Image: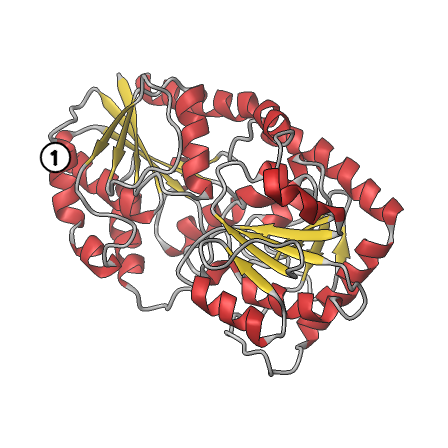
C-alpha cells in the first residue's frame, strides 16, 4: 500500500509543521493540497499536488461548498491500494468522502475541540456527524477530543486512536542556536513571548491588555508575538490604543525602542522563544497546542490557559482532562490558568478578574528565578514523551494495523 498526506495547505501553522515532520519520519513521498500555499521547505523527493488554485485567502464559504469537487479530483489519483492521512477539517471531509469513490483507506486527524468556539447549529457539526464515522480510523491529538467525537459525533471508540503530535527535539535544539540578526538586541531586555496564528482561538488581545498592566511594574519588559492571521489589524490597533509602542512586520521600521513586536510567521520560531523569560499562551480553545510543547522543548517556562483541550494533558498528565481550573495551578511542568471569556476587548474596558489573575501570576514568575528554573527543568523532561521517534512508532503501528486488515 502507498500512503499520502492530504492538507488544506502548507501555509504557516502548527498542523502544517506536524505534517512536515510526519512526512519526513514516515518517508511520505506525496502530499495533496486543497490550496496552493506553501510556506515550508520540503525535501526534494516529496511530490506536492495542489488540487486547485485556491489560496488561504479564498472565501471560506466557497471552499466549503467546493468539498465535493475537491473529493472528485482527489479520487482520480487514488485506488484501494492507497492510505491517505489528512489533517484539519476540510481535508478530513475530502478524505472520507473521496474514499467512497476510490475505496482508499482514510485516516483523519482531528486536532481541535469540535465543540469549543463554534455555534451548536453549524454546517461543520453536521459534516462531522455524517463523515467522521465513515473514516477507517480517527486519530485525535488528545483524550478530550476523543471523548467529544465518541459522545457527540457517533464515532465508534474502536476507531479512535490517541496519538500526540510529534516533536523533533534534535531539530529544535539545532534551530534555537541560529542568530537573530537585527532582532538580537531585543533580548537585552526581559521578553515574554507567544506564538500562534492571529485568530480568535489564540486570544492574543488578552495578552496585550495584560502586558499593558505588567509594564507598570517592569518598565523594560518587551512582548513578542509570532504569527500571522486575520486579526492582525485588530491586534495592532488595540496595541496602539493601549498606548504601547508597536512594531509590525511590513508596516513600520524595526527599532528596539518598541514595546510590542509583531514579527509575523517565522519558519524558525525556536530561536526567538528560547531567548524569552516566559512563554505565555492565552488560547480560548485548542486541540494539542504545538506551540506550547515547542516552547517547553526550548527550555522556557510556560504559562497556559486551561482551555479545551490539550494544555492540561500536557502540563498535568495525571489529572482528568475534563477538569478546568479557576485559579492559577502550578504543576511540575508549567502553570495552568483560568480561561478567558472569549469576548473581543477594547483598550478602555476594565481589567477582568481572569486578567488580574494572569497579571499577578506572570509578575510572580518574572520575579522568581528559582521557580522559573524549576519549571524549565520540568518542561524539558516532559517533552521527551512527545519525541518524534516515539510518536512515529505509534503511527507506523496504526498503518501496519490497516495493512493487515
Residue at x 63%, y 74% (from the top left corner)? 243
> Is residue 161 in view?
no
Q: Secondary structure at mark 1?
A: helix
Question: For this view, does 210 lie left or right of residue 94?
Answer: right
Q: Residues within 10 Å of mark 1 (few under 14, many from 20)?
A: some
Q: Is residue 398 above or below residue 261?
A: above
> In what quadrant of the picture does the C terminus appear?
top left
Number of marks drawn: 1
> Is residue 329 in view?
yes
Name the residue tied to disc 1: 101
Q: x, y percentage for residue 186? A: 68, 49
> In what quadrant of the picture does the N terminus appear?
top left
Q: How is the image coloured?
A: secondary structure
Question: For this view, does 89 lie left or right of residue 364?
Answer: left
Question: For this view, does 295 lie left or right of residue 356?
Answer: left
Depth check, front residue: 79 or 137? 79
Depth check, front residue: 402 or 251? 251
Q: Is residue 146 above or below residue 206?
A: above
Question: For this view, does 405 lie left or right of residue 198?
Answer: left
Q: Is residue 55 above or below residue 51?
A: below
Residue at x 39%, y 56% (from the top left corner)? 152
Q: x, y percentage for residue 384? A: 65, 28
Q: x, y percentage for residue 27? A: 38, 17
Image quadrant where residue 380 sits: top right
Q: x, y percentage for residue 96? A: 24, 40
Amino acid at each position: 500500500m502507498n500512503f499520502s498526506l492530504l492538507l488544506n495547505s502548507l501555509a504557516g501553522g502548527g498542523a502544517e509543521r506536524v505534517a512536515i515532520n510526519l512526512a519526513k519520519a514516515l518517508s511520505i513521498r506525496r502530499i495533496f493540497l486543497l490550496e496552493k500555499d506553501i510556506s515550508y521547505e520540503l525535501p526534494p523527493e516529496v511530490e506536492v499536488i495542489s488540487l486547485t488554485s485556491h489560496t488561504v485567502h479564498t472565501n471560506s464559504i466557497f471552499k466549503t461548498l467546493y468539498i465535493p469537487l475537491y473529493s472528485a479530483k482527489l479520487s482520480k489519483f487514488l485506488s484501494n491500494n492507497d492510505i491517505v492521512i489528512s489533517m484539519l477539517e476540510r481535508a478530513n471531509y475530502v478524505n472520507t468522502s473521496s474514499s467512497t469513490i476510490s475505496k482508499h483507506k482514510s485516516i483523519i486527524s482531528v486536532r481541535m475541540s469540535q465543540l469549543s468556539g463554534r455555534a451548536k447549529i453549524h454546517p461543520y457539526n453536521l459534516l462531522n456527524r455524517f463523515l467522521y464515522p465513515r473514516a477507517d480510523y480517527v486519530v485525535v491529538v488528545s483524550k478530550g477530543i476523543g471523548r467529544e467525537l465518541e459522545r457527540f459525533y457517533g464515532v465508534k471508540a474502536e476507531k479512535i486512536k490517541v496519538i500526540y503530535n510529534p516533536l523533533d527535539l534534535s531539530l529544535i535544539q539545532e534551530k534555537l542556536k541560529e542568530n537573530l540578526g537585527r532582532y538580537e538586541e531585543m533580548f537585552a531586555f526581559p521578553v515574554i513571548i507567544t506564538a500562534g496564528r492571529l485568530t480568535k482561538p489564540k486570544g492574543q488581545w488578552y495578552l496585550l491588555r495584560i502586558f499593558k498592566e505588567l509594564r507598570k511594574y517592569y518598565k523594560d519588559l518587551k512582548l513578542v508575538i509570532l504569527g500571522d492571521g486575520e486579526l492582525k489589524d485588530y491586534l495592532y490597533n488595540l496595541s496602539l490604543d493601549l498606548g504601547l509602542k508597536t512594531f509590525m512586520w511590513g508596516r513600520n521600521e524595526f527599532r528596539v525602542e518598541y514595546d510590542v513586536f509583531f514579527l509575523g510567521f517565522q519558519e524558525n520560531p525556536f530561536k526567538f522563544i528560547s531567548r524569552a523569560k516566559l512563554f505565555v499562551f492565552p488560547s480560548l480553545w485548542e486541540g494539542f497546542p504545538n506551540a506550547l510543547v515547542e516552547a517547553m522543548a526550548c527550555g522556557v517556562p510556560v504559562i497556559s490557559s486551561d482551555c479545551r483541550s490539550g494544555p492540561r494533558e500536557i502540563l498535568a498528565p495525571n489529572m482528568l482532562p475534563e477538569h478546568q481550573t479557576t485559579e492559577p495551578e502550578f504543576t511540575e511542568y508549567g502553570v495552568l490558568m483560568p480561561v478567558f471569556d472569549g469576548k473581543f476587548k477594547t483598550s478602555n474596558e476594565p481589567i477582568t478578574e481572569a486578567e488580574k489573575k494572569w497579571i499577578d501570576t506572570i509578575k510572580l514568575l518574572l520575579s522568581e528565578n528559582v521557580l522559573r528554573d524549576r519549571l524549565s527543568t520540568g518542561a524539558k523532561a516532559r517533552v521527551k514523551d512527545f519525541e518524534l521517534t516515539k510518536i512515529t512508532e505509534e503511527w507506523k503501528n496504526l498503518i501496519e494495523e490497516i495493512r493487515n486488515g
